């Protein structure tokens, strides 16, 4: 996006009254300020969206780590022979707690995005 907007205005001899020139220049200045305001709003929105996407990326990476950890714990339980030992029960309790934490994180991630609007009837 360009940093500035250049407009070239040429006044012809039959249009060159001072009042007309002043009015045109005032209008151009107002348009210039409006353009800067719009560009600033777009830039601010872009910054906010980039921050939002960064938070979502971090949340997804954290969830992937949680899932990998749960997978490793499940494998450890599956590889355990015989009856459930106190260590096995501790693994089961840990998995259950972690599963709840992952579920809570997914709910929080879902809350970051607005719901999809229902289709118009």
Image: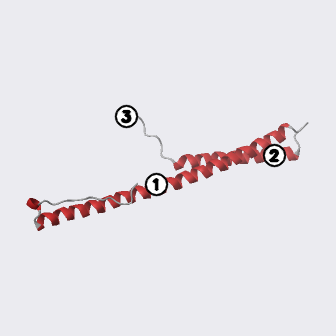
Q: Which residue is mark 2?
A: 91
Q: Quadrant of the C terminus?
A: top left
Instruction: Examine the image and state in which quarter residue 3 appears.
Output: bottom left
Left or right: 13 as drawn, with respect to 76: left
Left or right: 66 as drawn, with respect to 12: right
Residue 110: horizontal and vertical position, in percent? 55, 46
What is the CA distance from the residue labelled 3 to the residue labelled 2?
49 Å
Discs 1, 3 touching: Cβ within 8 Å: no
Q: Nearer the viewer, mark 3 or mark 2?
A: 3
Q: Nearer the viewer, mark 1 or mark 3?
A: 1
Q: Secondary structure at mark 1?
A: helix
> What residue is at 78 percent from the left and 46 percent from the top?
93
Q: Which residue is mark 3?
A: 120
111 or 40, nearer to the observer: 40
Mark 1 packing: few (<14 Cα in 10 Å), some, or many (20+)? few
Q: Which residue is mark 1?
A: 46
Residue 105: horizontal and vertical position, in percent? 62, 49
What is the CA distance from the residue labelled 2 to the residue labelled 1?
44 Å
Left or right: 44 as drawn, with respect to 90: left
Label located before the other in sequence (1 or 3) = 1
Q: Secondary structure at mark 2?
A: helix
């Amino acid at each position: 996006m360009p940093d500035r907007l250049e407009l070239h205005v040429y006044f012809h001899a039959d249009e060159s009254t001072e009042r007309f020139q002043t009015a045109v220049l005032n209008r151009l200045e107002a348009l210039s300020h409006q353009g800067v305001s719009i560009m600033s709003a777009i830039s601010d929105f872009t910054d906010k969206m980039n921050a939002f996407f960064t938070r979502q990326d971090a949340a997804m990476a954290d969830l992937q780590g949680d899932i990998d950890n749960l997978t490793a714990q499940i494998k450890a339980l599956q590889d355990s022979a015989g009856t459930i030992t106190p260590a096995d029960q501790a693994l089961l309790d840990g998995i259950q707690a972690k599963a709840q934490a992952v579920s809570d994180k997914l709910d929080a991630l879902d809350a970051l995005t607005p719901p999809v609007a229902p289709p118009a009837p």
